[in-house]
Amino acid sequence: AQSVTQLGSHVSVSEGALVLLRCNYSSSVPPYLFWYVQYPNQGLQLLLKYTTGATLVKGINGFEAEFKKSETSFHLTKPSAHMSDAAEYFCAVSLYNQGGKLIFGQGTELSVKP
Amino acid sequence: DTGVSQDPRHKITKRGQNVTFRCDPISEHNRLYWYRQTLGQGPEFLTYFQNEAQLEKSRLLSDRFSAERPKGSFSTLEIQRTEQGDSAMYLCASSPNGGSYEQYFGPGTRLTVT
């Protein structure tokens, strides 16, 4: 069965520091992987996606993620954190062989200290 | 380019009452999904439509829940005889046919059952 595990429910970084949010997945088919961001009392906004091809994918707001099949990982990074990056981040795997429904991780709350 | 919209944004109801939520997807998106999100958790899949056909329902969706998408455009989610455990954020997402199954989320409807 497909599943997603996000290591660390809460991550705190200083403004300007590297952001690293970890995601590991389990999938019986080649995965489609996504990162979403959620601000308080709002819906989810797509940050980036991996389907096929280049394993390093770039998204909005300076975020990027690398698909590593051997490690079953899809970690999200940003070289320099900004205060506006403070939010909840969700990693998800798409069951494209089941209509594309998403299986989400538990989420990681990112705090950015001034 | 309008995104996914949901109405109402907030709903407070008393236990035992029926509630109905509406979702308007991005125009021409064939697939529409409903998710439920409780505090501190990632969204959980409830059901999805391909045009007007409801193709899958999660076991989370008890008999008190029903969803429709009568003309393949907007969708409604009804909860009958609400219970306190139904309190959650209900998220709607839409996705274009084909492609990478990326989903675009609405702002959600927050339901509080008292």
Image (spheres, coloured by chain):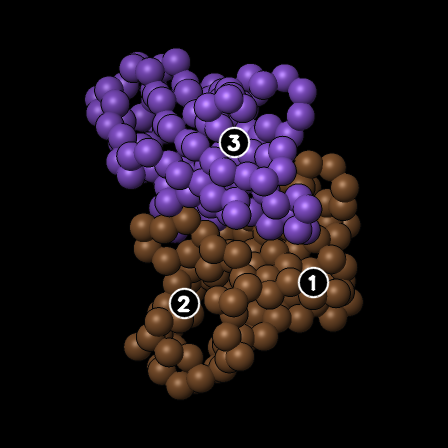
Chain colours: A purple, B brown
Q: Looking at the image, which residue is at 73% across and 49% down?
A: B29
**Could you tell whether B100 is left or right of A61 in the image?**
right
The first of marks 1 and 2 along the sequence is: 1
Label drawn at residue B111: 2
Where in the figure is residue A97, as x and y percent of width and height? 68, 46
Cα distance, mark 3 to mark 1?
A: 27 Å
SS under mark 3: strand
Label drawn at residue A47: 3
Badge 1: chain ID: B
Which quarter shows the C terminus of chain A?
A: top left
Q: Looking at the image, can residue A45 be seen?
A: no
Where in the figure is residue B45, as x and y percent of width and height? 52, 56
Report the residue marked by disc 1. B55
**Could you tell whether A96 is left or right of A19 in the image?**
right
Nearest the viewer among B30 and B46 is B46
Where in the figure is residue B66, as x and y percent of width and height? 58, 75
Residue type at tag 1: Leu
Where in the figure is residue A103, as x and y percent of width and height? 51, 47
Residue type at tag 2: Leu
Cα distance, mark 2 to mark 3?
A: 26 Å
